[in-house]
Amino acid sequence: MTAGLLPLAFPLPAYAGEAGYRLLELDGYKVKWGERRLGAGASVSYAFAGKTLRFDDARNCRDLAPIDALFGGNLSRETLARETAAAFRVWERAAGLSFHEVDDAREADIILGAQGQPRGRAFANVSYAPDPEEGVRAIEQALVCLNPDHEWKVGFDGDEDVYDIRYTLIHEIGHAIGLDHPGPSGQVMAFRYTEAFDDLQPGDLRGVQLLYGRAADDGGPANGVVTQLAQKVSDEAYHANNLIDHSVIITIEDKEIGSIR
């Protein structure tokens, strides 16, 4: 499979539809960090690549270049660190997730870097740990890589040919925690870049809360729809039927290829 610019070759999970989200499937399994149970929270580490890293089994981000390759123009080390932390906080506020940065990329759950072979805009690669039991699989590692040949910006200015780095990272982190593209528009996880909104939309919230539950500081009542969906999905067994390995290409791509228009 080449870059995931056309709809991914995985069946649409049940119960997504008009809810505005789609859970990522690898080999027919739902995947998430932490416990192999929908609705359970997780603590996830991340790091920036400080040297070139090679991931032979990855379908995407196989050659991960140092994050420094992205610096220049509007993007300094300090700016990227700030925008990345802010992108992770968006997901923390939405669900039972916590993220912390570590210095050593070899110890990180999610590694962010530049594309060693630049193409498109940004990609993510997700792999899961094998398990003899049926059900949800635990994510083992995720990679996020951005094209160093493209210009990046901070904030929206109406020019959708230059992508906002925070919005792009929010989208790619969504893939790295187990969410797929629900469709072309209307959600942060949709595959078209937009500057119509800069925060998670209702479908994004439903999807991430189905995977990880509500945020710890969210004192509101549990969402009935999300609770029912979690129960239905957790009762299903998902069988390997699609890929020859445990990784998948997910992308927020450039309009020449047609994913983001």
Image: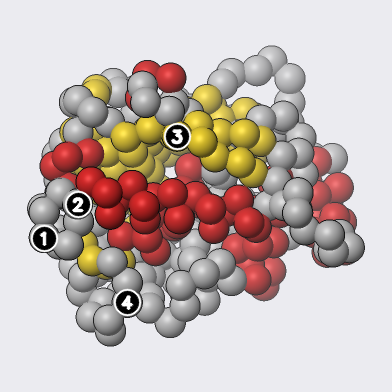
Determine the CA span between mark 4 and mark 3: 26 Å
Determine the CA span between mark 4 and mark 2: 18 Å
Q: Which residue is mark 3?
A: 101
Determine the CA span between mark 2 and mark 3: 18 Å
Which circle's residue, 4 or 2, is located before the other in the chain?
2
* Mark 1 element type: loop
Front label number (4 vs 3): 3
Determine the CA span between mark 3 and mark 1: 25 Å
Q: Amino acid at mark 3?
A: Glu
Q: Is residue 172 above or below residue 51?
A: below
Q: Amino acid at mark 4?
A: Phe
Which circle's residue, 4 or 3, is located before the other in the chain?
3
Say the numbered circle drawn on residue 30: none
| Residues at marks 2 and 3 touching, judged by CB atoms closer than 8 Å | no
Say the numbered circle drawn on residue 156: 4
Give x and y (percent) for residue 200.
56, 67
Position of 130 with respect to 174 (left or right) is: right
Q: Amino acid at mark 1?
A: Gly
Q: Which residue is mark 2?
A: 76
* Mark 4 element type: loop
| Residues at marks 4 and 2 touching, judged by CB atoms closer than 8 Å | no
Q: Amino acid at mark 2?
A: Ser
Is residue 247 or residue 88 the one in the foreground?
A: 88
Give x and y (percent) for residue 242.
51, 36
